[in-house]
Image (cartoon, rainbow, N blue to C red):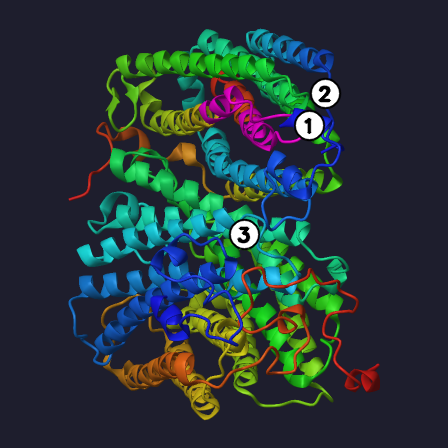
């Protein structure tokens, strides 16, 4: 297995440090009120962290184009599932918040006979 | 085995096969390694979509019940969640070190790295246990013990159950993967103590490493989604 | 499986060693990692499940002979639900991939085995465990939710054995994932020298596409059923409308797998038909690249059309329109395949052996099934036909008229390779005709019933529908006979059938270059592929 890449300790520790700093950052930023931007910042940081783990720790960077294609395909399919499903909810005609029955029942769900 | 490989000049194909655990239906160790890696990545894709079902549900309910979602965030312990994130990142580093050490035939380093990874993994689960325990005490476990009457935002008590259900489903499934991972690491540790892994054969370390990093990535998304982006003011 | 080994016995002097007679005893079968033996194990298991599911069909077809029905409605509900569950998850999904493809893919690409032989065996054991869970549910009284398990009925209200059946499907799903994963890696990494992607048999292409769907879709049904099971156990969950949950989300997640799953069921069948049509027309498949890529196109498109099962739920109108348009796009790659099969036959030297009869049946019935799918993909007509027998007839034309015909065709085509024996030619032709006639008599009346408005899944019906229902039941008995006869002559052939020789059909492809049955490692020497697939003689010169 001569073709396999052996990462240096330096790069591994660097990535680890980046991940720790980003974790600290995302926790700190979450305490600042940014409105809808809180979500965006948290997700962007999460994507960067996940990319660091995938790209270096999992070694996607050093793998074949085929493996990269598989990784991308997995993410694309996840996106298909989330996007198409939520697009249904985003374009429905009724508003879930306006359902009074959901809030008036004081007991839990109905149980089966 | 590795010594035999380097010192013996006229080793037979059979010896190579034994040193690299080459199975009969593969032509070369390289083909076997590539197949194992591709299989592992394919398996991880199935895992992405497995968790994807829950992430989809999360996105749907968070988008249609934003206020109920916000009402759950005050019960999420960011300190413990953040600590756990750091713990998992450390375990990923030690796992990456284990793979690297195996690639370089550093037997002792493999064992030490694996033990460190297992310690970090166990720490994560212990902290997770305390979080679950708090939820139980506060009556926030849907189905088993959910205190609708005393929920601080009574108008969202019902929908909050959905979000707590998702919290337990997602973190629970993640924790289950951690437990499976610890089992796999135990297997690796036994093999590593027996010096089975070297620069010619380290496929299991690399494969289980990929799994471990994947579980880490799931948590990297769970942490902000469940703990950070609610109504934190 | 013991039967096979006993019939073949120990290799006598002069008899060649093959995968069947190389080892004996039940251990040599239950602990085998040989993909061919695992395929045989799968053939036996899925045949058993096919007859379990078929028995349910017999019972409810008898029930439907009279308008008031034979059984109480709750029994009828369980019969059709278990029929669907057993047939879909334990016969159709594994049917061709786990049997014929498991047997043939390594041989077709010139490999000694699949990439992960032990995982292959594991997948069979997982399948058995899943099947046992489901059979337990059957024995205890069955499930009455329909095979779709729609929440909240399945999660909260049904008092049938939902958990056992759901766990059975959950478990069997992993068997399906492992099979797909094995195929994907095998096709990528195990091809013989010279076996380029453009030389792969189309059967391999279609099973590769199937593998992608299995790997990308099945995990979603796993987590969905798991959430459903939690919800049923904890009595609260995310699909529960009492606390604001949305049951339609269950349908989204369910159909994200289950719509692609119908392509898991049909794509391998299309691969079989490509092989058969080419062989019995003695001609290269017309437009090889188009047929190969249409498999991939179907695999990709299958993941963006699932909402067409939900037009009459509370799904957004805009989502429905999008899903409707996308669904119609699937017709394009499907039609490419049908046209290319017919074009392959054009000016070919067509012979009418049994596999080809099944292929003819497939092409006609699949076309009807596919075109009626367009009716259902159209929003306006779906309002009228949704939940009627029109839908039942449509998917049986695709699943039974398509997949089961292809499975039978493939089994007849490769039976000489699998067992080394030929079966009775007149009997097999007779039963192929029976299956075709019986099938049409069973399901064509259901199109009319659906058009007239008879809803599916109802235990009783108005008396004016009785004639058509009686016709359908009569057809079902002919169909059943058509499935039983092959069992008899196949078993007969194991002992008394004439030796087939390596290539009884004079077909092209690596599987016909090795002996019948093959040896454990398929080839004595790893083959080197020098020519394109389907390189049949001079006929193709005329077409150019």
Quarter of the picture holding the N terminus of chain B: top right
Direction from residue B200 to residue B52 in the image, left or right: left
Q: Chain of mark 2?
A: A
Q: CA distance from mark 3 to mark 2?
A: 32 Å
Q: Which mark is residue A7?
A: 2
**x, y percentage for residue B142?**
29, 26
Circles 2 and 1 on the same chain: yes
Which element type, helix, strand or loop, lies under badge 2? Answer: loop
**x, y percentage for residue C85?**
35, 59
Quarter of the image where one finds residue C442: bottom left
The dominant secondary structure in magenta is helix
**x, y percentage for residue B28?**
69, 44
Which element type, helix, strand or loop, lies under badge 3? Answer: helix
Circles 3 and 2 on the same chain: no
The residue positioned 38% from the left and 83% from the top of the image is C492
Is residue C124 visible in this depiction of the protein?
yes
Does residue C2 sit above or below A110 in this rendering? below
Q: Which mark is residue A59?
A: 1
Q: Are marks 2 and 1 in contact (CB under 8 Å)?
A: yes
Disc 3 packing (10 Å; few <14; some 14–19; many ≥20): many
**x, y percentage for residue C41?**
41, 61
Q: CA distance from mark 1 to mark 3?
A: 24 Å
For the residue pair C411 and B74, the one nearer the viewer reads as C411
Which element type, helix, strand or loop, lies under badge 1? Answer: loop
């Amino acid at each position: 297995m001569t073709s396999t890449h052996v990462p240096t300790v330096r790069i591994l520790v660097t990535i680890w440090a980046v991940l720790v700093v980003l974790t600290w950052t995302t926790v700190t930023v979450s305490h600042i009120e940014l409105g809808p931007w809180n979500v965006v910042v948290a997700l962007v940081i999460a994507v960067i962290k996940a990319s660091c783990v995938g790209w270096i720790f999992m070694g996607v960077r050093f793998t074949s184009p085929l493996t990269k294609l598989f990784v991308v395909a997995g993410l694309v399919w996840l996106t298909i599932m989330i996007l198409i499903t939520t697009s249904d909810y985003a374009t429905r005609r009724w508003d879930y918040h306006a359902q009074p029955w959901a809030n008036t029942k004081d007991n839990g769900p109905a149980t089966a006979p | 085995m590795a010594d035999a490989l380097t010192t013996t000049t006229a080793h037979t194909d059979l010896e190579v096969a034994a040193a690299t655990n080459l199975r009969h239906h593969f032509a070369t160790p390289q083909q076997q390694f590539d197949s194992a890696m591709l299989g592992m990545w394919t398996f991880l894709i199935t895992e992405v979509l497995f968790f994807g079902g829950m992430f989809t549900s999360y996105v749907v309910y968070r988008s249609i019940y934003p206020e109920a979602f916000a009402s759950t965030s005050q019960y999420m312990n960011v300190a413990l969640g953040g600590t756990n994130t750091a713990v998992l990142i450390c375990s990923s580093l030690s796992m990456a070190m284990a793979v690297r050490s195996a690639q370089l035939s550093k037997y002792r380093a493999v064992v030490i790295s694996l033990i460190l990874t297992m310690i970090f993994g166990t720490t994560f689960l212990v902290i997770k246990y305390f979080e679950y325990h708090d939820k139980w005490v506060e009556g926030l476990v849907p189905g088993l013990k959910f205190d609708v009457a005393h929920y601080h935002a009574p108008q969202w008590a019902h929908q909050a159950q959905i979000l707590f259900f998702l919290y337990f489903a997602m973190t629970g499934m993640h924790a289950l993967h951690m437990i499976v991972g610890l089992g796999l690491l135990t297997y690796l540790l036994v093999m590593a103590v027996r010096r089975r892994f070297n620069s010619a054969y380290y496929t299991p370390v690399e494969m289980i490493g990929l799994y471990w990093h994947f579980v880490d990535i799931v948590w990297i998304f769970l942490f902000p989604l469940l703990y950070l982006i609610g109504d934190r003011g | 499986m013991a039967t096979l080994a006993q019939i073949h016995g120990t290799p006598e002097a002069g008899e060649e060693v093959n995968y069947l007679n190389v080892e004996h005893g039940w251990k040599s079968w239950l602990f085998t990692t040989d993909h061919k033996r695992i395929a045989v194990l799968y053939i036996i298991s899925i045949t058993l499940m096919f007859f379990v599911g078929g028995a349910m069909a017999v019972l409810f077809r008898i029930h439907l002979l009279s308008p008031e029905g034979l059984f109480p409605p709750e029994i009828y509900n369980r019969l059709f639900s278990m029929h669907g569950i057993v047939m879909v998850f334990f016969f159709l999904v594994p049917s061709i991939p786990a049997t014929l493809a498991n047997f043939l893919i390594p041989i077709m690409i010139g490999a000694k085995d699949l990439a992960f032989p032990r995982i292959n065996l594991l997948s069979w054991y997982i399948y058995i465990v899943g099947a046992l869970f489901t059979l337990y549910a059957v024995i205890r009284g069955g499930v009455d939710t329909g095979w779709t398990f729609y929440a909240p009925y399945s999660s909260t209200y049904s008092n049938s054995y939902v958990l056992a059946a759901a766990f059975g499907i959950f478990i069997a799903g992993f068997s399906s994932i492992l099979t797909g994963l094995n195929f994907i890696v095998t096709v990528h990494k195990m091809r013989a020298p010279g076996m380029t992607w453009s030389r792969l048999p189309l059967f391999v292409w279609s099973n590769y596409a199937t593998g992608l769907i299995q790997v990308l879709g099945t995990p979603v049904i796993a987590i969905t059923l798991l959430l459903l099971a939690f919800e049923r156990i904890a009595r609260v969950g995310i699909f529960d409308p009492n606390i604001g949950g949305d049951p339609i989300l269950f349908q989204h997640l369910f159909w994200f797998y289950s719509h692609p799953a119908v392509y898991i069921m049909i794509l391998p069948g299309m691969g079989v038909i490509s092989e058969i049509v080419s062989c019995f027309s003695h001609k290269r498949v017309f437009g090889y690249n188009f047929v190969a890529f249409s498999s991939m196109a179907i695999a990709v498109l299958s993941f963006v059309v699932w909402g067409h099962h939900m037009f009459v739920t509370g799904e957004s109108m805009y989502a429905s329109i999008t899903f409707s348009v996308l669904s119609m796009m699937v017709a394009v790659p499907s039609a490419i395949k049908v046209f290319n099969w017919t074009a392959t036959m054009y000016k070919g030297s067509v012979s009418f052996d049994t596999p080809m009869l099944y292929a003819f049946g497939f092409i006609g019935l699949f076309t009807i099934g596919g075109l009626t799918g367009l009716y259902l993909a159209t929003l306006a007509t779906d309002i009228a036909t949704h939940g009627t027998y029109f839908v039942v007839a449509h998917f049986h034309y695709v699943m039974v008229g398509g997949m089961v015909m292809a499975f039978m065709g493939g089994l007849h085509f490769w039976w000489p390779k699998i067992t080394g024996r030929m079966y009775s030619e007149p009997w097999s032709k007779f039963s192929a005709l029976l299956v075709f006639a019986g099938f049409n008599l069973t399901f064509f009346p259901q199109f009319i019933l659906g058009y007239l408005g008879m809803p599916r899944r109802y235990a009783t019906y108005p008396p004016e529908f009785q004639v058509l229902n009686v016709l359908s039941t009569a057809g079902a008995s002919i169909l059943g006979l058509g499935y039983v006869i092959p069992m008899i002559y196949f078993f007969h052939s194991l002992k008394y059938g004439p030796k087939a020789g390596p290539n009884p059909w004079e077909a092209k492809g690596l599987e016909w270059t090795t002996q019948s049955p093959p040896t454990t490692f398929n080839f004595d020497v790893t083959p080197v592929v020098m020519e394109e697939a389907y390189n049949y003689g001079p006929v193709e010169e005329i077409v150019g």
